[in-house]
Image (cartoon, coloured by chain):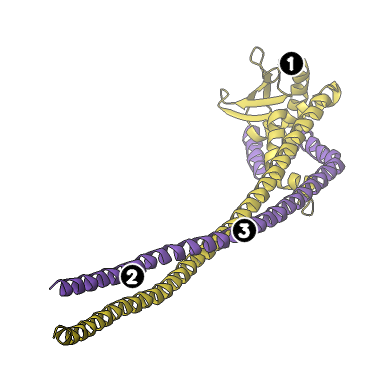
Chain colours: A yellow, B purple
């Protein structure tokens, strides 16, 4: 009886065990399936993520370095144009220095020529005479360097005579002023003044040098710096 | 009763195990993602180093051509300076002559407009 009654019980136990085993298998296999799905998905996601990261980073790096290379080019161009500018400026300064040196040398030559008293007296006479012609006054004052006083006085006498001859009879009394002289460092020449010294003809050699330097600058430049010389 | 209790425990254990399997998979997923990012970083770093190398090479080349340009410009400048100085040396006496003569050759001709004025003045003096 007992075996008879246990038999189905065991049977039932076994069936129940099988069912539970099945359920467990099912639960686990579902979990494994889910896990393997997750894994496949994770692999896919990871490789997509990797690809995306790399692509966008590469794109950014490319554009960054393109910009950097362009900047190198721009910097190079700027540097070059600055160098050209500096070189041009250097040459401009050189030319300016040459012009100033030329004026200095011309001044030196004129100054040395004033030591030839005879020639210089002739020059001073003409400087006074030119003043007289421009002013056409009856009396004028002449200002000169103190060291030129004697020389200017005799030049003035000659100038008076020539003025009369040139104009066909006009007379002008020329007074070389004593006590008020041109600067002792002046190259020479005279200032001819009339009407209480209100009207002045500045015929100093300094002024004439300055004048030629200003008026004849294009010619001086043309001579000193021909177009083909000094081009970068 | 104890049998079914045993069964429930088995099932619960299985559920727990299943949950652990899924949890492990999820954890792996995070790790894979991190791994992918690390891989990407390495590759990006390599790419960047390569770009930097190429850039430096380019920059050096540019510096090279720049200094070549600088040399050429400097040579042109020196040539220009020497041309200028040579010509100045050649024409300076002529230029100085021109200036000195201009200063010392004083024109004492009576200008046309002054002539009329002077003639009138001479006439009025004569009367």
Q: Foreground: B65 or A161? A: B65
Labels 1 and 2 touching (C-beta < 8 A):
no
Picture coordinates of residue A18 (x, y %)? 26, 83
The residue lying at 77 percent from left, 27 percent from top is A125
Q: Residues within 10 Å of mark 1 (few under 14, many from 20)?
A: some
Residue B30 visible, this orientation:
yes
Picture coordinates of residue A69 (x, y %)? 59, 60
Labels 3 and 1 touching (C-beta < 8 A):
no
Quadrant the N terminus of chain A occupies: bottom left
Residue B127 visible, this orientation:
no
Image-quadrant location for residue A90: top right
Tag of residue B55: 3
A194 shown above or below B30:
above
Q: Chain of mark 3?
A: B
Residue A80 left/right relative to A227: left
Q: Residues within 10 Å of mark 3 (few under 14, many from 20)?
A: some
Q: Foreground: A48 or A199? A: A48
Q: Chain of mark 2?
A: B
Picture coordinates of residue A171 (x, y %)? 69, 28
Q: Label 2 belongs to which residue?
A: B21
Tag of residue B93: none
Q: Label 1 belongs to which residue?
A: A149
Question: Could you give the CA–CA distance between mark 1 and mark 2, rounded to whole angstroms?
Answer: 125 Å
- Outermost top residue: A179
């Amino acid at each position: 009886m007992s075996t008879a009654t246990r038999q189905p019980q065991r049977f039932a136990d076994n069936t129940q065990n099988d069912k539970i085993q099945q359920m467990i298998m099912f639960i686990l296999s579902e979990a494994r399936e889910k896990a393997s799905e997750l894994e496949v998905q994770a692999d896919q996601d990871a490789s997509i993520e990797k690809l995306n990261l790399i692509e966008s980073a590469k794109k950014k790096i490319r554009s960054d370095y393109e910009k950097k290379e362009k900047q190198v080019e721009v910097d190079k161009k700027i540097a070059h144009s600055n160098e050209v500018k500096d070189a041009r400026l250097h040459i401009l300064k050189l030319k300016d220095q040459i012009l100033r040196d030329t004026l200095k040398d011309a001044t030196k030559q004129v100054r040395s020529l004033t030591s030839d008293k005879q020639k210089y007296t002739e020059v001073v006479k003409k400087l006074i005479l030119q003043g007289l012609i421009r002013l056409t006054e009856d009396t004028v004052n002449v200002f000169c360097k103190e060291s030129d006083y004697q020389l200017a006085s005799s030049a003035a006498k000659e100038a008076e005579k020539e003025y009369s001859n040139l104009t066909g009879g006009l007379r002008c009394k020329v007074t070389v002023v004593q006590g008020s002289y041109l600067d002792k460092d002046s190259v020479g020449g005279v200032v001819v003044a009339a009407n209480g010294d209100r009207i002045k003809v500045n015929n100093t050699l300094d002024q004439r040098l300055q004048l030629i330097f200003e008026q004849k600058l294009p010619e001086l430049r043309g001579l000193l710096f021909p177009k083909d010389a000094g081009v970068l | 009763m104890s049998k079914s209790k045993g069964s429930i425990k088995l099932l619960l254990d299985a559920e727990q195990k299943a949950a652990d399997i899924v949890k492990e998979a999820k954890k792996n997923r995070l790790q894979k993602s991190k791994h992918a990012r690390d891989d990407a970083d390495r590759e990006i770093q390599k790419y960047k180093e390569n770009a930097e190398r190429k850039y430096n090479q380019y920059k050096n080349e540019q510096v090279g051509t720049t200094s070549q340009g600088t040399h050429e410009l400097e040579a042109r400048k020196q040539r220009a300076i020497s041309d200028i100085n040579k010509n100045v040396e050649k024409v300076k006496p002529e230029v100085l002559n021109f200036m000195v003569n201009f200063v010392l050759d004083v024109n004492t001709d009576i200008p046309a407009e002054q002539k009329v004025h002077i003639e009138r003045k001479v006439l009025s003096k004569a009367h």
